[in-house]
């Protein structure tokens, strides 16, 4: 087990009606004027935005609003939000929505607290020196941004989608009512299930030595998500299954399943350019296609671990004489599970054609100047081979 520091400062309010506690909680912590940041349609239609407004007003917390967040949140709106927040002298940001809204709010917070353009900080890997208060009122089980130190931002002018990690991006508060996930479409629910699983799978499959405790935590989370995911797809109003998925999305990306390890997240890094170049591609759907292909490409470098995951997570029977067969069967079972959720299984299913591959590889490798770290270094040649396996 590697040495590690585990830091999870977010106070989580979980369950029915917790959205009504937003105003009193912020007021109790001294915030009197906030920015409410959101996307648009769903939080208006399901009434959540109005409940948050009433909660703030009843607690004596004034607010201004900035909507318009899109999937794969854009740096242009973040820049607009920074100037808007400065103008109105806000003291805290309240993100009402899913991972894209939370990530957009994190970008605004980073720019406000550090006086720099967030995209410059992301591209030049400039570490924040200050933080800005942030609360998330969650509406989907997927990204885990409500408790993570990560956010992902897109710049359509360069077709780049890039992530940035720093503990200053961890929200102060997360309000999670699983009932607000009932109205999420089956496709986006499935994307969220995959995204949740990937945040742990990319921590589980690393070149590190054994870490049995963290691995067992990861396996338990993944089995719970697998089972709850199947239940939700057949009964979207299953509260217990929805609650499992929402809490799992939070735990999967708050660092717990990576303690004592050094995760590299190669598949996330490759996928970001799929949905960066093709804005219509949902992150979870891209991961559902790429992760099995990546697994087939690297499993021989860690047959024992891939076989272990096949048995403990996917219920495959161990072939002790041929563990590589067990490993491969686990990858097959995983891909079939994603397909059962309605996820695509090929790049073509995402609308990605072979003519896109060279451009995608150039974006991911920064024109061949970097490699993606994995069990083996992934440069242009290797990523093209993964694309071939995903075709």
Image (tube, rainbow, N blue to C red):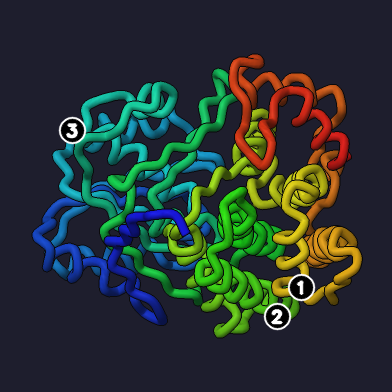
Is residue 216 rendered to the left or right of residue 380? Answer: left
- Give the mark nearest the N terminus, 1 or 3: 3
Q: Which residue is mark 1?
A: 311
Q: Looking at the image, which is closer to me, 88 or 138? A: 138
Whole-percent x and y of residue 44?
A: 45, 59
Secondary structure beneath disc 1? Answer: helix
- Give the mark nearest the N terminus, 1 or 2: 2
Secondary structure beneath disc 3? Answer: helix
| Residue pictured at 83% horizontal, 32% vertical | 385
The quadrant holding residue 391 is top right
Whole-percent x and y of residue 321?
A: 90, 68
How far, Cα to Cα, is label 2 from label 3?
A: 47 Å
**Above or below, comparing residue 20 to residue 330 in the picture:** below
| Residue pictured at 39% horizontal, 27% vertical | 125
The mark closer to the camera, 2 or 3, is 2
Q: Which residue is mark 3?
A: 87
């Amino acid at each position: 087990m590697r040495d590690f520091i585990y830091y999870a400062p977010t106070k989580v309010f979980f369950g029915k009606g917790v959205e009504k506690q937003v105003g009193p909680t912020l007021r109790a912590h001294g915030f009197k004027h906030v920015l409410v940041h959101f996307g648009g349609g769903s939080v208006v239609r399901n009434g959540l935005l109005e409940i948050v407004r009433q909660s703030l007003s009843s607690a004596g917390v004034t607010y201004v609003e900035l909507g318009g967040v899109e999937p794969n949140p854009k740096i242009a709106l973040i820049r607009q939000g920074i100037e808007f927040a400065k103008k109105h002298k806000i003291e805290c940001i309240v993100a009402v929505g899913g991972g894209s809204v939370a990530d957009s709010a994190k970008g605004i917070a980073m720019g406000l607290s550090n006086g720099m353009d967030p995209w410059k900080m992301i591209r030049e890997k400039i570490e924040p020196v200050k933080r800005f208060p942030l609360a998330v009122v969650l509406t989907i089980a997927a990204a885990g941004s409500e408790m993570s130190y990560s956010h992902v931002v897109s710049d359509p002018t360069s077709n780049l989608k890039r992530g940035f990690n720093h503990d200053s991006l961890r929200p102060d508060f997360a309000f999670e009512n699983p009932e607000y996930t009932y109205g999420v479409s089956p496709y986006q629910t499935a994307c969220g299930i995959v995204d949740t699983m990937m945040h742990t799978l990319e921590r589980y499959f690393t070149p590190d030595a054994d870490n049995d405790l963290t691995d067992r935590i990861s396996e338990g989370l993944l089995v719970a998500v697998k089972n709850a995911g199947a239940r939700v797809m057949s009964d979207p109003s299953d509260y217990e299954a929805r609650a499992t998925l929402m809490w799992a999305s939070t735990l999967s990306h708050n660092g717990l399943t990576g303690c004592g390890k050094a995760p590299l997240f190669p598949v996330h890094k490759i996928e970001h350019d799929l949905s960066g170049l093709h804005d219509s591609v949902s992150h979870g759907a891209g991961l559902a296609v790429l992760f099995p292909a990546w697994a087939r490409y690297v499993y021989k470098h860690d047959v024992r671990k891939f076989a272990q995951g096949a048995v403990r997570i996917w219920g495959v029977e161990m072939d002790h004489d041929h563990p590589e067969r067990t490993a491969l069967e686990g990858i097959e079972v995983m891909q079939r599970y994603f397909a059962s959720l309605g996820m695509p299984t090929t790049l073509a299913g995402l609308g990605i054609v072979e003519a896109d591959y060279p451009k995608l590889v150039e974006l991911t490798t920064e024109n061949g100047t970097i490699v993606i770290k994995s069990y083996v270094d992934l440069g242009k040649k290797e990523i093209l081979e993964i694309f071939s396996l995903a075709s």
